[in-house]
Every structure is written in C-alpha cells, then in structure tokens.
Image: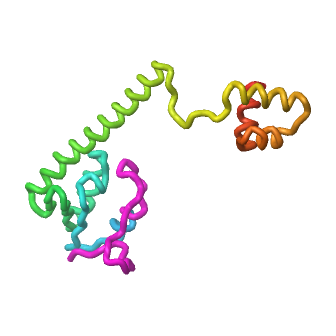
Amino acid sequence: MTRCWPPESTSGTCGVETASGRRDDRPVLAALLADIEMADAVVVTKLDRPGRRVSHLVRVVDELERRDVALRSLSEQIDTSTSAGRFMVHMLAALAQMEADLIRERTLDGLAAARSRGRIGGRPTVMSPERLATARASVAGGQSIASVARALGVSVSTARRHLAELG
C-alpha cells in the first residue's frame, strides 16, 4: 500500500521535509519511519532525499527492508523490493555523497580563494570610515549613541558594534 505522510494531509500532497538531507534528526522522516507498516512503500522524488550520506541512506533502506517496506524513487525509477533496486540504491547513494562532498569542498576552496584576494563574505558595511569618524567625534562630544545612529541613518546596534570595535 502507498500512502501519504502525514495522514491528515488534506491537500492531496504528501508531507514535505524542510530539513537538509545531511541531517540525521529530521522530524518528518522520523515520524514516517515510526508510522510505516509492513508492505507499505515509501516514495521519494529523488534518492538523495532520505539522506545524502551513504551511511544514513543505508540505515534508512535497511530499516525499511527489515520492516518489509519498499523504497521507490521517482526520478531514478528505483524500487528496493528488487535485488537490482537495492544494488542501485547503494551505488547512487555513494554518488550522492561524493557529489555533496565535492560541492562542500568547492565552496570552501572558493571562500579561501576569495579571502586570499582580500575579499570577505557578507553584507557590505554601512559604516564608512567617514561615518565612523563622525560617530566617534559625536559620542566623544557627549551625544548618545542612539542620537548618533539616527543622524547617520544606521541602527543603534550597528553604531554600538562599530564604536565598540574601536574601544
């Protein structure tokens, strides 16, 4: 039997997990695994949705297999009720983990290369050196940080943060 999770879904669509596939503590997946019964089928859009790491996906597939539940992937057209399907799950899980690891490595390499060129990520600061000098002079002259922030058009927390960095 194939059914949607959660069962109270009135939209006709199945439950949607919003947590990353890299995480092991995913509430919708945990609830689904707790609720499945023998001869059910778990249908996923892609094989990497239940888990990106091979170890986690293998644990999920083994748990389903132990409970006589098939895992069916729509995009890869894999069904773990067959031996060829189980083999393909393990092969594709290894590829999914490698892909996720490569993306992570490339991202970290790109950030390191940008840092070596003097670039730092994040939003550009609104406190230019001129604004900062004005803020320091105003606060030294007795104005409150709140009034200085208002005059410069920045938030009080931004003004405090930048003035605190200077001591």
Residue at 31 percent across and 77 percent down: it is 12
Q: Is residue 32 left or right of residue 153?
A: left
Front-lying residue, 117 or 56: 117
Q: Quadrant of the C terminus?
A: top right
Number of numbered discs overlaid on the protein picture: 0
Q: Is residue 149 magenta?
A: no
Q: Which is the main secondary structure of the residues drawn in magenta?
A: loop
68 above or below 106?
below
State the image coordinates of residue 144 (x, y, percent, origin top left). 86, 39
User: Farthest right residue?
Assistant: 142
Q: Is residue 142 left or right of residue 47?
A: right
**Vertical placement of 13 versus 28: above or below?**
below
User: Residue 20 or 41: which is nearer the viewer?
Assistant: 20
Q: Nearer the viewer, residue 147 or 88?
A: 147
In the displayed structure, would residue 139 be above or below residue 151? above
Q: Residue at x 35, y 51 (%)?
A: 21
> Which quarter of the figure has residue 15?
bottom left
Please state if 97 lies on the left or on the right of 128 as rendered. left
Give the left or right position of residue 163, taking residue 50 as reference.
right
Q: Residue at x 55, y 37 (%)?
A: 123
Q: Position of residue 117 (x, y in %)?
A: 46, 19
Give the percent coordinates (x, y) of residue 98: 25, 38
Q: Quadrant of the N terminus?
A: bottom left
Range drawn in magenta: 1-29
148 to 115, vertically: above or below: below
Residue at point 35%, 78% (across, down): 11
Q: Is residue 9 magenta?
A: yes
- Colour scheme: rainbow
> Between residues 99 and 143, which one lies in front from this camera angle?
143
Snapshot quadrant of residue 18: bottom left
Query: In x, y percent, where is residue 69?
Result: 21, 67
